Image (tube, rainbow, N blue to C red):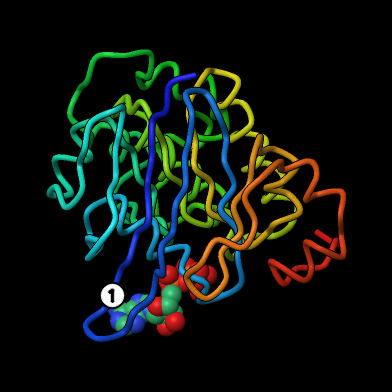
Amino acid sequence: MSAVLEAEGLQTYYGKSHILHGVSLKVNQGELIALLGRNGAGKTTTMRSVMGLTPPRDGNIKLFGKDVTRAASHRIANAGVGYVPEGRKIFGHMTVHENLLVPPETKGPWTIETIYKLFPRLEERKTSKGGRLSGGEQEMLAIARALLLNPKFLILDEPSQGLAPVIVQEVMRTIGRMKGEGMSILLVEQNAHLALQLADRAYVLSDGEVVYDGSAAELGADTERMEHLAGVSHAG
Ligand SMILES: Nc1ncnc2c1ncn2[C@@H]1O[C@H](COP(=O)(O)OP(=O)(O)OP(=O)(O)O)[C@@H](O)[C@H]1O
């Protein structure tokens, strides 16, 4: 199995604050990996390190087999990594369709047409302004826009954040369908219970260190351990 992402021993700082203490993680081709942990555990910092937004001071990062440690973030995006940051930065004054016309055209399976097949809700709302969409629709639009760049690997930062439980289920189902299309995905989530139902493997971070690295099913089945490591209850 070839790896899309191999991060080894990441040491990342914000100024003098030492946040990541040797984080290592790997995503293989076609895998859906969950990255879990309590608030402030270092999940977003890990993503920012991988994307070159907050480069690690030590450690190394390989994408698709090539070293990209401390490469500029646009180079990492151009290498085929789609990043959907927390907080869905869509254009509120533009319609759904106009939002989808923003990314430059790229070669690959994802076009506006195939996007509308994956997200029928977005097609129904194509003439609505982005700012009028529900939180779940905005999240789908943010994911759709990232897919239009035809990335080989997608990183999603807390897509369920701030969404009603029934909408979260829908977003998770969509993520499952993207995996079904063969996409390699790193899913950063607070909602461990749902993420573990979808993921092949999971990593749990605590205070900037990996405290679990293994099967998602195994962790999902061990409620007590999950609660202890990721600070979540089984409800969700
Ligand atoms: N720009 C920053 N400057 C200084 N410290 C920061 C900065 N951003 C985050 N931190 C700190 O780094 C630590 C890890 O934060 P990070 O955002 O990576 O956690 P997280 O696991 O993604 O949590 P959350 O779910 O709250 O986003 C926290 O202690 C946070 O306070």
Image location (x, y in percent) of residue 140: 50, 42
Who's the residue at 30% across and 58% down the image?
49
**Residue type at numbered disc 1:** Tyr
| Ligand 1 placement by image quarter | bottom left
Image location (x, y in percent) of residue 71: 14, 47
Is 142 in front, or is 236?
A: 236
Image location (x, y in percent) of residue 137: 53, 46
The quarter in which the C terminus is drawn is bottom right
Q: Is residue 101 left or right of residue 164?
A: left
Is 76 in front, or is 86?
A: 76
Q: Is residue 84 left or right of residue 116?
A: left
Q: Quadrant of residue 211?
A: bottom right
Who's the residue at 62% across and 50% down the image?
213
Determine whether 76 is above or below 180 in the image.
Answer: below
Who's the residue at 21% across and 82% down the image?
15
Is 201 in front, or is 210?
A: 210
Mark 1: few/some/many CA within 10 Å (<14, 14-19, 20+): some
Which residue is situated farthest in the bottom direction here?
A: 16
